[in-house]
């Protein structure tokens, strides 16, 4: 076989093992893996390097307006370039429907933002905040049919919260049509009650954001979300889990055979609420929701990443600059509820996970590949991505596991004016990133043309057919009532 490219002599990381050998690429796909492959119009020397599946960033806010209308700093060019420098070959940002908007129009808008700009292959998760009859019966099924097979809903924020009944209805639609519901789980009233009490006491500095959204608010909402999904027999993906209590609930549901999935994010492993206590308004750089917690939480979340409760570690890249276009859109000294929620990290997700995970001995290379790429491909239906196996897209990241570098803003490629990871020394960096066999980043330089990325139509999500059915919905146990959605 004549290869377009042979990646030679690296340690190849497959889902089951790591071994030294060659990878042969033809027409943008992986064609062969062997101890030694001859030829190749192009030969890439990977001696001393790790050859990993390119990362799939499954949680990022790119060219997205928040519910209050604030635009994220990164567009599909800077967002995808930054992701590529961070070892990713594809990504799935959100396409957000705000109240009153049609889902069809939202998809059209995001197509016009992504297609001319992205250097990486992309898809979207929808965000649904207005699940009216037309959305549930026409627009969502149409979106699923064109390969947008996941969407996020919120249990918090007045402008986004669907309420329990709304959750049941949309979970039912997802189950029927083979889509995966993602959920932001925080109890809205607990948060509002805390906000009101903090405001009444005049406590509005950034550090109070951390305590305004208690761990209990997350645990309560995760428990409720799992119960709602369980009643209708739907799968559920809980985004940005930030508490041990929440992760324990997910682990318990998984142990019962329920199709409950979850991610955590590097910020919950790397930072604590002490970072919100930085001088002046510096703490605003660390405002995200759910908020940062404490060291004991970090240790518990690592344990859950290691044991597989979390199937993905995603960045939740939500870039708002430290200026009037972002964090200070509501004034120079805003109260914490008026500060945009989110921090940037699309390029730091994998270097952080590699350094603190693999290099620090917390997770294996196979776990790294699963958490960074393979599981997202499987859950979100990117059928040809996420593994170094014959027939898969040649989406590949070649890493130098020995290189130690200090993170600086100057090395970032996003549109941000800060990185919360500034000054961190990390070991293990991606050197060469390929997408469908084409070099996107090599030796610190961008090689890809704007707009080369392609939309990826994703396969449906189907929960495990052996998952338990609630007795009240099982005709064998409920006097024959056919009420299962
Ligand atoms: N949820 C996210 O996933 N990202 C930013 C803010 C939020 O509430
Ligand atoms: Zn969220
Ligand atoms: Zn997010």
Image (cartoon, grey):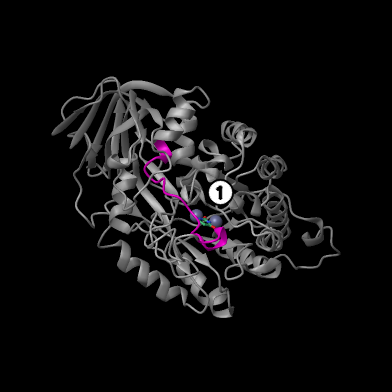
In this view, the residue farthest toward the right is 479
Work out whether residue 254 or residue 468 is closer to the camera in this orientation and state it: 254
Question: Residue at horizontal 49%, vertical 29%?
Answer: 357
Left or right: where 341 falls relative to 133: left
- Spot occupied by residue 167 in the image (x, y as percentages of width and height): 65, 65
- Spot occupied by residue 353 in the image (x, y as percentages of width and height): 45, 34
Residue carrying label 1: 240
Q: Is the magenta stretch mostly helix, strand or loop?
A: loop
Work out whether residue 95 or residue 170 is closer to the camera in this orientation and state it: 95
Q: Answer whether residue 122 is visible to the viewer in this image.
A: yes
Q: Answer whether residue 454 is visible to the viewer in this image.
A: no
The region drawn magenta spans 334-350
Q: Name the image quarter holding residue 147.
A: bottom left
Is label 1 in a helix, a strand or a loop? loop
Above or below: residue 66 compared with residue 307: below
Question: Residue at horizontal 39%, vertical 38%?
Answer: 422
Was residue 342 drawn as part of the magenta stretch in this picture? yes
Asked if the residue at label 1 sits under 8 Å from ligand 1, the reply is: yes
Above or below: residue 193 compared with residue 38: below
Left or right: where 382 falls relative to 150: left
Q: Residues within 10 Å of mark 1 (few under 14, many from 20)?
A: many
Q: Name the image quarter holding residue 164.
A: bottom right
Left or right: where 274 falls relative to 246: left
- Spot occupied by residue 215 in the image (x, y as percentages of width and height): 68, 47
Tell how many labels.
1
Left or right: where 137 falls relative to 17: right
């Amino acid at each position: 076989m004549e290869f377009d490219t042979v990646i030679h002599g690296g340690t190849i990381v497959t889902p089951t093992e790591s071994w030294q050998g060659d990878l042969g690429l033809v027409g943008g796909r992986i064609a062969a893996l062997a101890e030694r492959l001859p030829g190749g119009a192009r030969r890439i020397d990977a001696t001393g390097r790790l050859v990993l599946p390119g990362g799939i960033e499954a949680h990022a806010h790119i060219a997205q307006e928040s519910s209050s209308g604030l635009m994220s700093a990164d567009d599909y060019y800077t967002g995808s370039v930054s992701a590529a420098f961070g070892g990713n070959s594809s990504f799935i940002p959100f396409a957000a429907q705000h109240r009153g908007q049609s889902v069809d129009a939202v998809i059209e808008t995001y197509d016009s933002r992504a297609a001319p700009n992205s250097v990486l292959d992309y898809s979207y998760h929808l965000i649904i905040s207005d699940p009216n009859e037309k959305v549930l019966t026409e627009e969502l099924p149409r979106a699923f049919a064109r390969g947008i097979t996941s969407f996020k809903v919120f249990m918090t924020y007045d402008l986004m919260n669907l309420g329990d009944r709304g959750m049941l209805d949309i979970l039912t639609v997802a189950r029927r049509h083979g889509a995966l519901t993602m959920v932001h789980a925080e109890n809205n009233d607990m948060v509002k009650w805390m906000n009101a009490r903090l405001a009444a006491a005049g406590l509005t500095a950034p550090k109070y954001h951390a305590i305004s959204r208690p761990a209990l608010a997350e645990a309560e909402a995760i428990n409720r979300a799992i119960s709602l999904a369980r009643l209708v027999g739907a799968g559920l993906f809980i985004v940005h889990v930030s508490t041990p209590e929440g992760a324990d609930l997910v682990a318990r549901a998984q142990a019962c055979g329920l199709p409950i999935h979850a991610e955590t994010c590097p910020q919950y492993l790397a930072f604590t609420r002490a970072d919100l206590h930085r001088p002046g308004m510096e703490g605003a750089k660390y405002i995200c929701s759910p908020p940062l917690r404490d060291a004991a939480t970090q240790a518990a979340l690592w344990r859950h990443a290691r044991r597989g409760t979390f199937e993905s570690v995603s960045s939740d890249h939500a870039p708002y600059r430290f200026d009037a276009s972002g964090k200070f859109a509501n004034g120079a000294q805003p109260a914490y509820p008026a500060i945009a929620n989110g921090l940037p990290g699309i390029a730091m997700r994998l270097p952080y996970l590699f350094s603190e995970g693999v290099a620090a001995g917390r997770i294996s290379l196979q776990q790294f590949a699963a958490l960074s790429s393979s599981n997202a491909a499987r859950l979100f239906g990117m059928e040809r991505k996420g593994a170094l196996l014959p027939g898969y897209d040649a989406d590949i990241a070649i890493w130098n596991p020995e290189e130690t570098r200090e993170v600086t803003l100057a090395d970032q490629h996003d549109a941000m004016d800060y990185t919360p990871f500034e000054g961190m020394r990390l070991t293990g960096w991606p050197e060469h990133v390929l997408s469908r066999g084409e070099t996107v980043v090599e030796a610190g330089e961008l090689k890809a043309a704007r707009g080369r990325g392609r939309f990826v139509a994703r396969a449906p999500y189907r929960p495990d057919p052996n998952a338990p059915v609630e007795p009240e919905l099982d005709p064998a146990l409920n006097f024959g009532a056919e009420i299962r959605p």
